[in-house]
Image (cartoon, coloured by chain):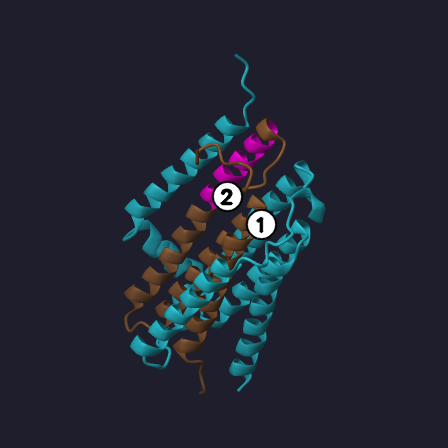
Chain colours: A brown, B cyan
Amino acid sequence: MESIPLNAYLTLSAFLFAMGAVGVALKRNPIVMFMCIELMLNAANLAFLAFARYQPTVQEQVAGHIFALFVLGVAAAEVAVGLGIITVIFRLRETIDVDEVNLLRE
Amino acid sequence: MLERFFFFLLALLAIATAVGVVANRNPVRSALLLVLNFISLAMLYFTLSAQFLGVLQVIVYAGAIMVLFLFVIMLLNLGSPEAVAQERELRRPLAWLIAVGLFALLVSQVFLIISPSTPMAEPEVGTARAIGLALFTQWAFPMLIVAVLLTVGVIGSILLARRRVA
């Protein structure tokens, strides 16, 4: 049976990760920046699952799946807190432009 | 042959939607494209014999997390492209430089270190039964830590959302 090489999955994962990094660096809307962070986390998950499929033992394969599961849980907690922070910033400042919210920088 | 066809189809969909998320100026459209991206990734998980993670990806990411995103966008009235000034934002050369460098670095590592091999996983590795067995025996302690993290996250977001009385 002809199968897909591991490199193909990893290259796709690298592209998605770099695309997420571009989004975080370019965007000024923190919600879209958050979406790009989700994109990067998903790229990492894809790499985990691709590596898991090419491991020799069942235990290592399941370990890759468990890691992806944990990344999912951490992402959920991160989104809950991050969106809460964005809501509070909007309530206090009436804007969420990341170039204008710079209280901690100065 | 069929396997390759589906992989390239799904990879193309994932790449196109990822570019769309970054290039789109409307946050709502970005969010909807991200949902498509998550669904195509879930399909890719299925091709990697990770059925349970694929289903979770659709339920947790495409279902719960993106609904939260859309809810906040609507709540804060950020749906229009003018809500946050975005002119000149695609012309930050340093950001593109970093991203292209990052991609080149990652791909060079992929092709330097990893030699292509055949998949080893049996189809039953990714089922809910196998993952549940590992999660509640070998990985029980890390799972408890993630549970604590999620609880802290919920408490933190409740504290953030609460209006200050005094």
Looking at the image, is A31 positioned above or below residue B117? above
Q: Amino acid at mark 2?
A: Val
Question: What residue does disc 1 label?
Answer: A32
Q: Report in which chain the residue with disc 2 lies.
A: A
Answer with the quarter of the image where residue B116 lies: bottom left
Point 54% across, 72% down: residue: B11
For residue A67, above or below residue B162 = below
Q: Is residue B31 above or below residue A53?
A: above
Which region is colored magenta?
A76-91
Q: Check disc 2: other Cα within 10 Å, few if <14, some if 14-19, many if 20+.
A: many
- Nearer the observer, B104 or B131: B104
Residue that label 2 marks? A79
Marks 1 and 2, Cα distance to the nearest angstrom?
A: 12 Å
Decide which of tag 1 and tag 2 comes sooner along the chain.
1
Amino acid at the residue labelled 1: Val
Q: Position of residue B51 (x, y in %)?
A: 48, 64
